[in-house]
Image (cartoon, helix red, strand yellow):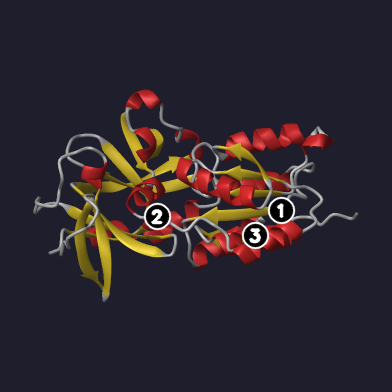
Amino acid sequence: MSTTALLDSVESHTRLAGHNRVAMLLFRLGDKQLFGINVFKVREVLRKPVMEKLPGMHEWLAGSFDYRGKTIPVIDLAMAMGYPPLAGVDSAHVVVTEFSRSMQGFLVADFQRIVHCTGESLEAPSVTLGFGNRVNAVSRIDGQLMAVIDVEQMLASIEEVAAEISPHMQHQAEQSHLAVRRIMVVDDSVVARGRLVNLFKRMHIECIIAQDGREALEQLTAMAENDGERIGLVISDIEMPRLDGYALTRAIRETPVLRHLKVVLHSSLSGVFNEALVRDVGADRFIAKFQPDLLAKTVLELMEPSTN
């Protein structure tokens, strides 16, 4: 199947969003192991172009190339995952992706096809599989293990992202009078959770952590029975195993004891389509990762002020 034919069908896959289903682009990195990435992140799949590699580039970077008038970096995903590098393999492909307001390519051995997965079929990987924090979910495709790449972890290993709020915003947070200084952070990425916890620590806001939407819903339901465990806001990723952020938001809105909660969807998936879905499922805001001051400002705007 050509890359054009493969990605021409992406628009139809977007209908899965909001229903705890996701479409995955499958590829390999040098052996039979299947890997996947959400098609919402994929702009195009190309045969490996001629690339330029400059001195001082991170060892995982195969180089950069001109993509439709924009110079984008290409990460040798095989090398990052412990396979022999693909930079010298002429038959390799580049998966061009866009998320978190940036564009980059990932060098892969070949692409396979697009498959549909339910949230329930995706689960956190066991440490015994040996993927470490480079993979944030696994599933079975026709009986074969498929590992979903944690792209945020990959990029964090290459380039540091500013994770601190400005002194002005920190001062504003310290001076704010909030009824509850506790929020729930829902994200399957270790990197993303760490950034959020550190940010809110500076704002003197306590974080309750959940690693996916199912765990979050269970915790929220249990906390609703105890007034002493109130939270002021839920900040959730969208892509997660078991129950994604869209489905979590819908469940919150459909549960009487939870529907009053403010929900911010905080995701590397961006674009007009995603923002429309955010409104459809009843979330209060959507913020693309990772914008510390905007996130802090949004939290202060949405959290209930103290009446004292």
**With 144 as the anchor, is 283 left or right in this view?**
right
The residue depicted at 74 percent of the width and 55 percent of the height is 303
Residue at mark 1 = 262
What residue type is disc 1 on?
A: Lys
| Image coords of residue 38 (percent x, y) | 39, 50
Mark found first going from the N terminus, 3 or 1? 3
Q: Which residue is mark 3?
A: 170
Q: Whole-Å distance between the Cαs marked 1 and 2?
A: 30 Å
Q: Residue at x 60, y 59 (%)?
A: 295
Q: Is residue 120 above or below residue 273?
A: above
Q: Which quadrant would the C terminus be assigned to in this image?
A: bottom right
Residue 42 in percent (x, y) is at 34, 58
Side (left or right) of 263 relative to 44: right
Tag 2: amino acid: Glu
Tell which residue pokes out farthest to the bottom in this image: 69
Determine whether the residue tagged by mark 2 lies in a helix, strand or loop: loop
Circle 2 Cα neighbour tier, 10 Å, few/some/many (<14 / 14–19 / ≥20): few
Q: Nearer the viewer, mark 1 or mark 2?
A: 2
Q: Is residue 141 visible?
A: no
Distance (Cα) linking label 3 and label 1: 21 Å
Q: What residue did someone put label 2 on?
A: 160
Vertical placement of residue 95 versus 101, above or below: above
Location of residue 14 in the rendering, given as x and y in whole percent from the top left corner? 46, 57
Asked whether 301 or 142 is in front, the reply is: 301
What is the residue that sits farthest to the right in this orientation? 308
Residue 219 shown left or right of residue 56 in the figure: right
Separation (CA) of disc 2 from disc 3: 21 Å
Residue found 58% across the figure and 51% down from its top: 199
